[in-house]
Amino acid sequence: MAIPDFQSIMLPLLRLAGDGHVWLTHDARDRLADEFRLTDNEREQLLPSGTQRTFANRVAWAVSYLKQAQLVGSAGRSKFQITDRGRAALATPPTRITIRYLMDNFPEFREFKERSKPKAGRTSAPGDGSEEQETPEERFQSAEHTLRRALEIELLDRIKQVTPTFFEQIVLKLLTAMGYGGSVEEAAAHLGRGGDEGVDGVINEDKLGLDVVYVQAKRYQDQTVGRPAVQGFAGSLEGQRARKGVFITTSQFSPEAREFVKRIEKRIVLIDGQELARLMIEHNVGVTEVRRYSLLRLDETFFEEADA
């Protein structure tokens, strides 16, 4: 049979996870390939880019979308497990799990799709027929935004699973990649583990050390960082003789915390989990380039002489 599209994979994948075990993605992929009776050639078929097997890519997207709907949850590196919500869905399953089904039934998935959309452009989900109303360039941009947002979510999920020591390394590498603190070794000399799954300290804002920035990073799962924590951080700047500060968290800041930093004299930047993942992608920390695409357009100026 033909290689199934990723929407056709989602329900069989959820049923597979219904046994309650922790599944490795590649084990689930092999089991599903057997279920769909794929030939050896179909299992080995590559995407047009030549960078990944088509079926493996579609299984990965099926897992990702089920995670966004919270039907399965991450259970470690390349692992997933069914959630209570997933079990409830299997109790009265649809004939097929599609993007439209996830959009209609799970608000977290709708929020994910909203965040994945370009700021101006599509208002519908892929797979619902809206592609026919878009130009190829618009579809290209929509796909780019969806891929970027999915990577941000996957990256943040991995950050929350690493050890405190490795989290410290992530913060150091990101700050130095952004131009702060000199080398990783120099930044490490000034930043240290805070004892509560975080790092803190003072690093140079510029290479000459003319100004310093107080940094605090806290690795939380879902705990919202409120105004008291940010207010305490602002007070710490005094003891460090710093006028500027960066507070990084893997979770999120409350509206009160964000409003507080707008009204104080000191300059404090709050970086939540989503922004942390975005900055890591922007500065190539924890990600690797698989393939680069160039969108070309006819150069009308090239042909001006011919038209004259």
Image (cartoon, rainbow, N blue to C red):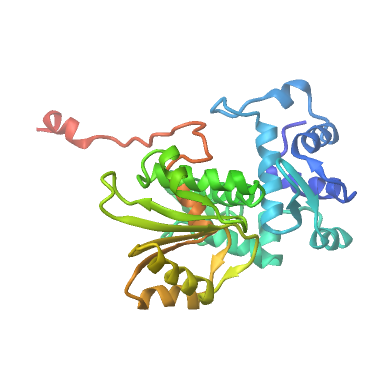
Would residue 278 appear left or right of 212 to someone viewing this image?
right
Residue nearer the viewer, 178 or 149: 178
Question: Height in image: 128 above or below 143?
Answer: below
Q: Residue 47 lies in what quarter of the image? A: top right
- The residue at 60%/49% (across/down) is 159
- Residue at 58% x, 47% y is 167
Left or right relative to 41: residue 222: left
**How many numbered markers are drawn?**
0
Residue in the foreground of this view, choosing between 94 and 170: 170
| Residue 141 can be seen, yes or no | no
Which residue occupies 54% across, 74% down? 226
The image quadrant that residue 211 belongs to is bottom left
- Is 188 situated above or below 308? below
Pinpoint residue 104: horizontal percent, then vertical percent.
Answer: 68, 65
Pinpoint residue 121: horizontal percent, then vertical percent: 43, 58
Is residue 190 visible to the viewer in this orientation of the structure?
yes
- As drawn, the residue found furthest toward the top would be 41
Position of residue 235 measured from the top left corner of the image (x, y, whole percent): 43, 72
Residue at 45% across, 73% down: 258
In what quadrant of the picture does the N terminus appear? top right
Is 273 drawn above or below residue 7 in the view shown? below
